[in-house]
Each structure stands twice: as C-alpha cells, then as structure tokens.
Image: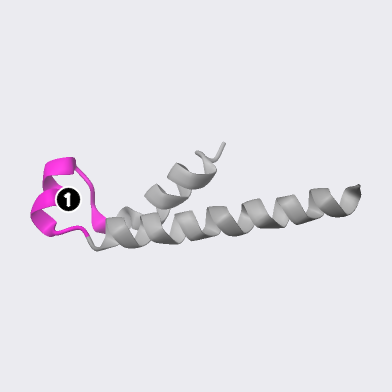
C-alpha cells in the first residue's frame, strides 16, 4: 500500500516540475512588448513559475 503512495508522490512531483519548467520558459521568452503590457519582468520568470505551480511561500 505504501509503495503506491510513494509512486503517486513521485509522479506528482515530476508532473509539477515539468509544468514549472514550461511555465518558466514561456515567461522568460515572452516578447518584450507583451511582457510590458502584462506587467511582467522576464527576469522574474523563476519566481513567477514557482509560485504558479507550487504556491506562494509562507
């Protein structure tokens, strides 16, 4: 029973990491005019992606 829980936990962690990397890359590669319109600084891509996928740190 515990092995299924570990497997599910690892599967979820891997899926979240893939989502984090995709989100980070998309933010970092936004054209400057679109980023400016959205009020996003591409240098904040890692923080924004992390908060989006994993939630805001306490």
**Residue holding disc 1:** 35
x and y, in percent, of residue 6 in the image:
80, 54
Q: Residues within 10 Å of mark 1 (few under 14, many from 20)?
A: some
Q: Work out whether residue 58 or residue 9 is closer to the camera in this orientation and state it.
A: 9
Specify whether residue 50 is painted magenta. Answer: no
Toward which corner of the image does residue 46 lie, by quadrant? bottom left
Residue 52 left/right relative to 26: right
Q: How is the image coloured?
A: one colour
x and y, in percent, of residue 24 in the image:
37, 58
Q: Is residue 52 above or below residue 28?
A: above
Residue 6 left/right relative to 1: left
User: Which residue is pictured at 56% across the width and 55% down the height?
Assistant: 15
Toward which corner of the image does residue 32 lie, by quadrant? bottom left
Specify whether residue 41 is painted magenta. Answer: yes
Return the residue found at the far left.
Answer: 33
User: Which residue is pictured at 53% across the width and 45% down the height?
Assistant: 54
x and y, in percent, of residue 1 in the image:
91, 47
User: Which residue is pictured at 29% across the width and 55% down the height?
Assistant: 27
Q: Work out whether residue 9 or residue 47 is closer to the camera in this orientation and state it.
A: 9
Residues in magenta, as a range: 30-42
SS type, badge 1: helix
x and y, in percent, of residue 57 in the image:
54, 40
Residue 26 left/right relative to 21: left
Q: Main secondary structure of the magenta part?
A: helix
Return the residue found at the far right.
Answer: 1
User: Which residue is pictured at 34% across the width and 56% down the height?
Assistant: 45
């Amino acid at each position: 029973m515990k092995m299924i829980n570990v497997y599910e936990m690892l599967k979820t962690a891997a899926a979240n990491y893939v989502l984090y990397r995709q989100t980070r890359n998309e933010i970092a590669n936004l054209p400057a005019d679109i980023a400016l319109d959205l009020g996003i600084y591409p240098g904040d891509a890692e923080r924004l992606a992390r908060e989006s996928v994993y939630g805001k740190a306490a």
